[in-house]
Image (cartoon, rainbow, N blue to C red):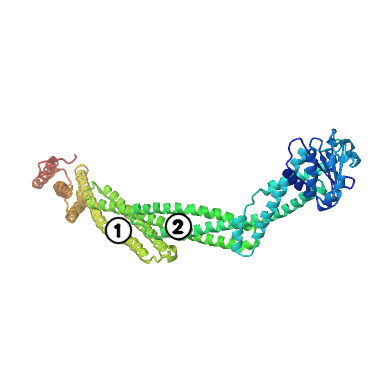
Amino acid sequence: GGKDRRSGLILTIPLCLEQTSMDELSVTLDYLLSIPSEKCKARGFTVIVDGRKSQWNVVKTVVLMLQNVVPAEVSLVCVVKPDEFWDKKVTHFCFWKEKDRLGFEVILVSANKLTRYIEPCQLTEDFGGTLTYDHMDWLNKRLVFEKFTKESTSLLDELALINNGSDKGTQQEKERSIDLNFLPSVDPETVLQTGHELLSELQQRRFNGSDGGVSWSPMDDELLAQPQVMKLLDSLREQYTRYQEVCRQRSKRTQLEEIQQKVMQVVNWLEGPGSEQLRTQWGIGDSIRASQALQQKHEEIESQHSEWFAVYVELNQQIAALLNAGDEEDLVELKALQQQLSDVCYRQASQLEFRQNLLQAALEFHSVAQDLSQQLDGLLGMLCVDVAPADGASIQQTLKLLEEKLKSVDVGLQGLREKGQSLLDQISNQASWAYGKDVTIENKENVDHIQGVMEDMQLRKQRCEDMVDVRRLKMLQMVQLFKCEEDASQAVEWLSELLDALLKTHVRLGDDVQETKVLLEKHRKFVDVAQSTYDYGRQLLQATVVLCQSLRCTSRSSGDTLPRLNRVWKQFTITSEERVHRLETAVAFHSSAEKILQECPEPPEAFNEMERFDEIESVGKSLLDRLTVPVVYPDGYAEFFSS
């Protein structure tokens, strides 16, 4: 870092007692002389050969070697001699006489006299100067500088190759350059950081003094350190910026290619194996269990599709992010990929949804059909059981239950028709695009099955309706039978009540002919009422016989009711005849008595016609006797009129 009075650089060669390798020294000098710029080299060098710890022949060899290494650049060679001189050896070789041959001036000088040729501030402490110098620090900084220079130069070449490769015209060259030079051998960030640290160190050492003395710059501008570092850093930043852009473009292209590859994977699976799975699933099943099995199979297919739909969602988000990032050159391709992916996924999702809705409709159809079949079986079972009710009320209840079941069957059949028609409509809308093939044959089987189920249910329902009509007629006849039997029993009770009234209340005979005739007329009307009641009961019992014959059964009460009716009627007839006989006798008695009383107003003792009186008396006694006699029925049972 020191300079002579001509501003030439000072090169110090310290020699030691050990054997000095001239080859190594030559290489070292070549290296050191390669550091300064050409401008610095033009000002020449002052070489200080420190021979205080070496032998004369070594010093002489070194000086002569300078002639071969740097003859043009060396202007002065100062050989620092030891305090104890090399005896007479110096007389054998006078350097000053060899100036023309060597090309530079050589002087022998002691260390304390060296300041005559070089300023003390440009000499280190070893030579009595004040120049601060740390050789290990210089060496470390130089190693860092050279390492940075080597890495940055190599990195610049690599980055330039990568960047230039990315600018090539053909895609084939692009791919080849990417494959060979995509990653640099060293990390650009690390190299840039090293360069910035080195530049900061150089600038700090340049502008800061040491111990209050003159600042020391072992690698200043003349040694090309700082400008070279700055130039390399500028070039690195430029190339690294381009490299980052290249990496960004390549990353985007790689991402785009990966997205395109995944999109094609999704599309190929959905249009290949996914569509093939749906092509094999076209049936709707012939029962609830079969439809449920098909639904389970469809759920497995949907599960496989859901994995690819998840990939679709992820890809769609990635494409949307790239579209928002938005390079114009990629927009068209990205939108085309997004559209293709969306079209295929939505079409496949529509097919899955259509299939799921179809199977759900088929399951509902079979469920309604099964419920209707069970209702028809229950109705048929009810119709097949013979009716043996205890009374008309139970028959009415059974008939009401039968009507409710038939109405429920009607509702179920209507629901089946609606479900079947809805299912047929869905099947008719199943175009060939739904599964990628013509499904006419498969649809015909499904349609035939649905129509067959509805027709079968209609026939079963019609048969049940016919049986219900027959059963309804039979039950109505049974209701009528029970009604006739009930009314016939009621007629017997009414007739019994009339008989009881005749015996207990129809007892007066009247006080004269007129009153007796009125009672006789009332009695005839009373008998007419009884006769109508008896005739009504007979008609009801005859109707009961006809109904029993129609129903092919024997009445449980008609056999007992008819004898009862005849017995009561017989009793009433006998009692009525007795009542008529008594009233007619009373009329005869009153008529004869009134005639005699009209002809003979005097007391009976004055009558002259005793025979007529005797006749009247005989009639009266006969009537009195009759009033005390009971009415005797054919079965021997006797009944008295009330007094």
Residues 431 and 417: in front is 431
Counting from the top left corner in percent of width and height, residue 452 is at 31, 62
Q: Is residue 52 above or below residue 397?
A: above
Which class describes the residues within 10 Å of circle 1: few (<14), some (14-19), or many (20+)?
Answer: many
Residue 26 coordinates in the image, percent (x, y):
75, 46
The three-letter code of the residue at mark 2 reads Leu
- In the image, what residue type sits under mark 1? Lys
* Residue 45 pos. (x, y %): 84, 47
**Among all residues in the image, which is located at the extreme left?**
611
Q: Quadrant of the N terminus?
A: top right
Q: Are marks 1 and 2 in contact (CB under 8 Å)?
A: no
Task: Say which residue label 2 marks.
Answer: 352
Residue at 15% from the left image edge and 40% from the top image edge: 640
- Residue closest to the eye, 37 or 69: 69
Vertical arrangement, residue 613 with respect to residue 301, above or below: above
Give me the C-alpha separation between circle 1 and circle 2. 37 Å
| Residue 523 visible here | yes
Residue at 66% across, 57% down: 161
Q: Quadrant of residue 235?
A: bottom right
- The residue that disc 1 covers is 461
Assign a secondary structure to mark 1: helix
